[in-house]
Image (cartoon, rainbow, N blue to C red):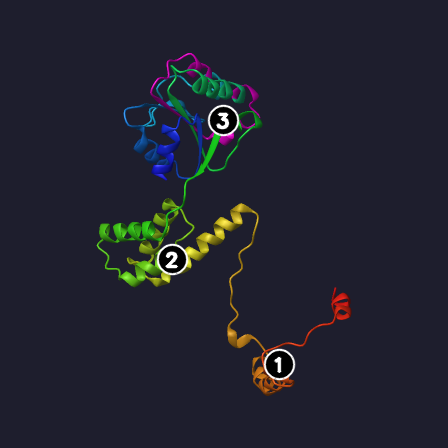
Amino acid sequence: MQILLREHVESLYPLIYLVTYEEREADALIQSVAGDRQILEWDMARGFVDFSTKRPTSPYQSLSDAVETLLEMDLTNHFIVIKDAHLALNQNPLGVARIKALADKIVHHDATSATLFMVSPQPCVPPELEKFVTLLDLPLPDESSIAAIITSYAGHYDLDLSASLIADLAQAFRGLSKQEITQLLNRGYQRDGNISANDIELVLAEKEQIIKKSGILEMLPIREKLEDIGGLSKLNTMRPFHRRCRTSTPSIRNGRLPRVSSRSRRICR
């Protein structure tokens, strides 16, 4: 992802929308490609804040007022980061119009060398901004990254976890964010002072919570076993009949099926 983001920045893409729940991961990614650029950040809660400390740097300004300020600034060699973008842009025509003006300034004014980042857990791209925006979904941790998180956690608490257990946990944790993984490791450790395969049930419960909060699907635990399925014993009695059917005609025995007449094909249709 770092390489992809750097390519977009160096290719002068004006507005990059990072879709993620983990703002710290987004900050680290932006910082990794910033180089010597100055980073200005605005968020819905505090307005302009210091990118590193998150402390306010000026009295609060709404998004539209903040972008108006940016339009009057010299933005050479700048990154601009807008947090909570989906909230700030929703039903905010003045804010959208001014962001469009800012994006146009970045694209068409040679003296303006800047990249505008918007960060939120879900995209909100008004039609007026579609031609300027590039959407990038920050991926959730893969199994190797999850294994590294588990190993680091185990080392911090001096836990002896086998490689097979780490692999099983990494598989179970797939689809969760780094924060969610850490919270589940904390819960498992608080239960009995250790991390074990028994903690996988916590993962399933957490995923059930995520699905419930989405309001789209419902996750139901599977309690049935193969032994609960009736009729499997009858399949053995069907095998002799199946073998007779397979060898009932010479064409089938030779591996060739009978040719279907054109009349039969019309009927099948």
Residue located beneath label 2 in the image: 171
Q: Residue 123, image x and y in percent? A: 50, 35
Of residues 122 and 10, which is closer to you in this image? 10
Please say whether residue 240 is visible from this viewpoint. Answer: yes
Q: Residue 136, image x and y in percent? A: 44, 37
* Whole-number angstrom distance, CA of label 3 to CA of label 2: 38 Å
Residue located beneath label 1 in the image: 252
What's the amino acid at mark 3? Answer: Phe
Magenta segment includes 222:
no
Q: Is residue 21 above or below residue 249?
A: above
* Whole-number angstrom distance, CA of label 3 to CA of label 1: 63 Å
Residue 224 in the figure: left or right of residue 32: right
- Within-10-Å neighbours for mark 3: few <14, some 14–19, many 20+: some
Label 3 or label 1, whichever comes before in sequence order: 3
Q: Secondary structure at mark 1?
A: helix
Q: Which mark is residue 132?
A: 3
Label 2 or label 1, whichever comes before in sequence order: 2
Q: Which residues are magenta?
A: 67-95
Depth check, mark 3 against mark 2: the one in front is: 3
* Whole-number angstrom distance, CA of label 2 to CA of label 1: 46 Å
Q: Secondary structure at mark 2?
A: helix
